[in-house]
Amino acid sequence: MIHTFVICAYKESEYLEACISSLMAQSIRSEIIMVTSTDNAMIRNMAYKYHIPLYINNGESGITQDWNFGLAQVKTKYATIAHQDDVYEPTYTEALVVRMERSGRPLIGFSDYFELRNGQRVSDNSLLKIKQVMLYPLRIKALQKSRFIRRRSLSMGDAICCPSVCYCLENLRQPVFAHHYRSCEDWEAWERISKEKGAFVYVPQLLMGHRIHEQSTTTEILKDHARVAENYEMFCKFWPKAIARRINAFYTKSESSNNL
C-alpha cells in the first residue's frame, strides 16, 4: 500500500467510530493506524474492534507532538492525519493519491471540505466559499509548483483544511510540525512547506467532512483570544506589519462562522 491514515485519538470521542468507518469505506485500501497520548479503554476497544495498530505517545504530548509522533510511525509514501471527529468521502484517498502521483514532486495534497453541524452537512457558508476563492489559483496544475502563487494563497489566511491534507513524507522535512503555536500550527507548517521545491496538489472536491461541535478542538481554540495574536504573527510572514494588522482584523471577524 502507498497511503496510511493516522487517526489521532484524544480522550473519549463519540465520533471516533464514525471516523474509522469512513476510512474503511475508501474506494482504495490504505493502512490505518491510531495514535494517542491519552490512553484509555474506549480508544483501546476501538482499536481492538477494528484491528487497528495502536501506538501510545508516552513522550511530550500536545497537538503537534501527537501529529509528529503519528507521522513517525508511517511506513508508506503518503499519509493523512485523520482527526477523530471528522469523516472522509469514499473517494478521498483515490482522488488525492492519483493526482499527487501525477504531479512529479508533490509536497502536500488537499481537498475542499464540508462542515458537519448538528448532524447536518453544510457546504455553502461564507467561510467555506471564501476559502475556495483563496485556493482558486491552485486549481491550475502549472501553478501548483509556483512558490509565489502558493504563498499568495496563504497570505490572506489559512484556507487549507488540515484534516484534508495528504503528506508526501519522502519530500518533506521532518518533523513536519513545529511546537510554536496552539492554533496556527498547521498554517505555520504550510508556510514553511510553501518555500520548498514541489507541488501543492489541490483537488477542488468536497472529499471530507469537518465536524463542528462544542467539544471540538476547532471550537475550543476559537474561544482562545491568543489565536488573534497568532494570526497576526502569521500575517507578518507575508505582509508589512501595518497591512498585517488590517488583514488580521478582517480575518478574525470571518472566523466567527466556525462557532456554533
Image: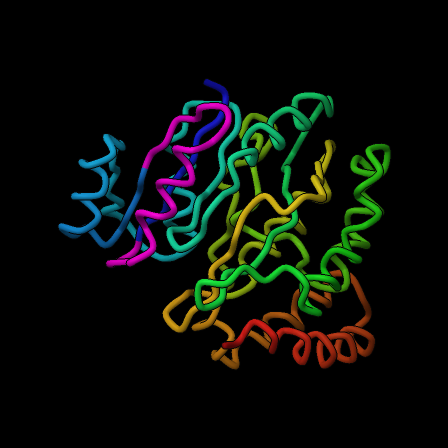
Which stretch did the figure color magenta? Answer: 10-33
Q: Is residue 260 left or right of residue 255?
A: left
Q: Is residue 28 left or right of residue 129?
A: left
> Exactly how many numbered labels are in the figure?
0
- From the viewer's side, name the closer residue of 209 and 196: 209
Query: In this picture, is 200 found above or below 160?
Result: above
- From the viewer's side, name the closer residue of 226 and 214: 214
- From the viewer's side, name the closer residue of 160 and 203: 203
Question: In the rendering, at what x and y percent does residue 38 appear?
Answer: 23, 54
Residue 161, visible in the rendered structure: yes
Farthest residue toward the front?
120
Question: In the rendering, at what x and y percent does residue 16 appear?
Answer: 32, 50
Query: In this picture, is 66 found above or below 255?
Result: above
Q: Is residue 104 magenta?
A: no
Q: Is residue 75 left or right of residue 126?
A: left
- From the viewer's side, name the closer residue of 117 and 33: 117
